[in-house]
Amino acid sequence: MNVLRKLTEEKLKTCEVNEFEFYNRYVAVSLDQSTEIINAEQGTPSWHKARKVRLTASKARAQFTYYSNKNADWDKRYQEVFHCNFLGNEDTIRGLRCEAFARDLYAEHYSCMILESGLLVRPELPWLSASLDGTAMDKDGNFLRNIEIKTLKEGIRLTADELIEMNAIPILDKNQNLKKNTQHYTQMQVDSDPVFTLVLDPSPVLNFGPGPVFVSHPSPVLHSAYRPAFDSDFATSNSTDLNEVGDKR
């Protein structure tokens, strides 16, 4: 955090006057403004407005890798990142249909509450942001972890166990370790509140029928594999087609 904050301060010193004014007017936020932004529901005009001038967790890795491009066209890149007309695809649409169901099961299985929020913007690094899928809280309202939900379209025809056995999950290596050079890993780094932790516990896999949903959360150590979070009895008794559930919600 301190390194990023220092780099930000150094970069601001090299900005043109109009750039510095834009940053202070549209990007920099106070603690009160940060609170207002995180309380704005995802998908609302306020949420879109806040995202428009910030690098988001889901886009972070693409910019990091592009930085090494010897023929980089940053004007073009800026337009692609901040003026993108992407409206969703099969994966994102499926995710929207399944996320609420995954949150409910996660909360039930781990006896916790899941807090939904808007855009996380830290006043210390206001140019960086993350839209969390949920924040797990204990019964007393204490922070446990942030969660990231991933739905895989391959899960329509295969269970989570089958996908793992086939080494068919692109973000995992042959030993079922989470690959660090993936968009998902970088996204979770940014999602990790409060200090942008560089580690991830990739468990568990919610294995309930066709369409497994992967829920990952930050942890002090990097565990070695995605593993089923539900035993066979639980999985059998709660096996549900997520597509069917998504249509009902």
Image (cartoon, helix red, strand yellow):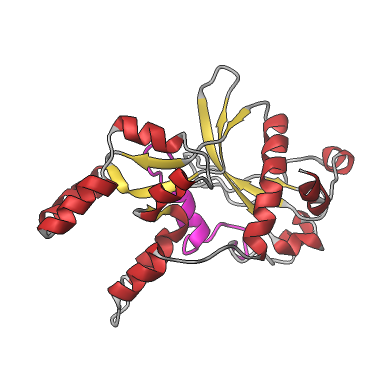
User: Does the image show residue 131?
Assistant: yes
Q: Quadrant of the C terminus?
A: top right
The structure residue drawn at horizontal position 56% and vertical position 43%, both measured from the top left corner, is 133
Query: Looking at the picture, how far across and down is residue 53, in whole percent?
Result: 34, 54
Residue 26 to residue 184: above or below: above
Left or right: 7 with respect to 198?
Answer: left
Query: Looking at the picture, how far across and down is residue 104, in whole percent?
Result: 70, 35
Q: Quadrant of the N terminus?
A: top left
The structure residue drawn at horizontal position 53% and vertical position 30%, both measured from the top left corner, is 144
Q: Which residues are magenta?
A: 172-198
Left or right: 96 with respect to 79?
Answer: right
Residue 183 to residue 201: above or below: below
Left or right: 117 with respect to 102?
Answer: left
The structure residue drawn at horizontal position 84% and vertical position 42%, both measured from the top left corner, is 232
- Residue 138 covered by magenta stretch: no
Q: Main secondary structure of the magenta part?
A: loop
Residue 174 to residue 101: above or below: below
Left or right: 113 with respect to 42?
Answer: right
